Amino acid sequence: MTTRVAVIGAGIVGLATARALERRGFTCLLFEQGAPGGGQSAGESRIFRHAHNDPRQFELAVRARRDWKEWEAEFGVQLISPDGAMAIGAESVSRLEKYADDPAVRVREMTPEQVTRALPILAGYDGPALIDDAAGAILTRLTIAHLIESVGPNLVPERVESVVPRPEGGVEVTSSFGSRDFDAVVVAAGTGTPALAASADINIPSEPRAHVRLTFPLASGVREPRLACIQDSSGAFGEAAAYGSPVRGNRSYAVGLALSAEVDSESPEDPLSGLAERTRAYVREAMPGLDPDGAVPFQRWITELPWAADGLAIWQEGDAYFVAGHNLFKLAPALGRTLADSVVSGMVEPGFRPEARLGAPALEAR
Ligand SMILES: Cc1cc2nc3c(=O)[nH]c(=O)nc-3n(C[C@H](O)[C@H](O)[C@H](O)COP(=O)(O)OP(=O)(O)OC[C@H]3O[C@@H](n4cnc5c(N)ncnc54)[C@H](O)[C@@H]3O)c2cc1C
């Protein structure tokens, strides 16, 4: 039996899905309109964290961490830095603390001296702090490069215009080169997913928003042997919530505020320049070990779902599956498997359906 499957979008999620499908013996074409890994998955670093408001997402992150280790073994490289992910401030600490006894994480409380050792570029801080030594910075480019090498021969450099599931089964995919039929289709097109879902009569409630993050060189020009990731909700440095992660080689550090901006194409104002300026001001206060004037901005659309910043769901119509959400990089290996399982079983696991509102803090008690 040959099942022909199309994956639309060669970001981290589409690449992970194509790889998982091929592992299950499916013939798979991967459509990409631009450079693989050049959309939301671009850039040099992402945070892998177990800490999530929704315990179901914590479980998913645990599965993903195992999958990351498998990728590391298969590709023969380290893809997640060993320096951990630190939480400072009450909210970030409480999000991690509740999983502290789970054997999958390695969470420990930190003294101010330990905070400084884990992140020497940080200003003095003596509030609540935890670190998860089983988390860390994802080496994004290395990951994408290895996945492209693995599934690259099946890349189709075409923009898909519509994805129409047929009532009798199968899906018609129309691209810039015409229409083709597939037995099943997975759409992981990032900001392009809602429009393709609309062609299948599915409404994905996600308006793209813009986010900016800046990469700062180390102030002294030296490389620190250890740089943990950070999630800062302390408010100690003038912003309610910020995050940071080291870039491969520890010569620079990427910092962003946990904020995004609505983009009004009618307005002459650039909504991200204000956020970039606030990020620089935060770094001046919080991270004297960085050079605030040497920052390189990186901006992208993000696709948050309305129920949570980490919200994630898979929509299904016939044999077509559409995935949307934010902060998906760390979860991608497990999400790719889940999408491949959906194709195999012909249905989405209930916990990933939109009505499950994966990521919603209101479901914490379940
Ligand atoms: C600045 C920033 C910081 C972030 N930090 C983190 C973090 O610390 N941890 C974390 O886990 N996540 C983080 N994220 C989120 C994470 O990067 C994204 O959730 C993830 O990369 C999304 O991957 P994707 O494959 O779904 O989408 P994308 O990478 O956008 O891939 C979709 C692909 O589909 C293609 N495409 C779109 N439409 C079509 C079409 N019609 N036809 C053909 N191809 C099409 C696009 O060209 C694109 O390559 C961050 C995001 C940003 C922007």
Image: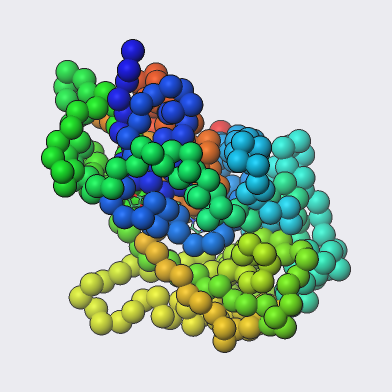
Q: Residue at x 73, y 42 (%)?
A: 105
Vertical position of residue 217 compared to residue 188: above or below: below
Q: Position of residue 301 (x, y in %)?
A: 37, 62
**Residue farthest to the top, as pictured:** 1
Q: How many numbered marks are there? A: 0
Residue 93 visible in the picture: no
**Residue farthest to the front, as pictured:** 153
Vertical position of residue 21 compared to residue 100: above or below: above
Residue 116 shown left or right of residue 60 in the figure: right
Instruction: Give 99 or 225, whichever is nearer the viewer.
Output: 225
Q: Quadrant of the N terminus?
A: top left
Q: Position of residue 273 (x, y in %)?
A: 41, 80
Residue 285 shown left or right of residue 325 in the figure: right
Q: Residue at x 17, y 25 (%)?
A: 166
Instruction: Give 329 or 147, whichever is nearer the viewer.
Output: 147
Q: Residue at x 33, y 67 (%)?
A: 262
Query: Which colouring convention does the figure follow?
Result: rainbow
Q: Position of residue 247 (x, y in %)?
A: 61, 64
Q: Residue at x 53, y 45 (%)?
A: 146
Q: Quadrant of the C terminus?
A: top right
**Corner quadrant of residue 114:** bottom right
**Corner quadrant of residue 317:** top left
Instruction: Give 79 or 245, whichever is nearer the viewer.
Output: 79
Vertical position of residue 305 compared to residue 263: above or below: above
Residue 226 shown left or right of residue 144 in the figure: right
**Residue farthest to the left, as pictured:** 178
**Corner quadrant of residue 209:** bottom left
Q: Position of residue 351 (x, y in %)?
A: 46, 30
Residue 11 visible in the picture: yes
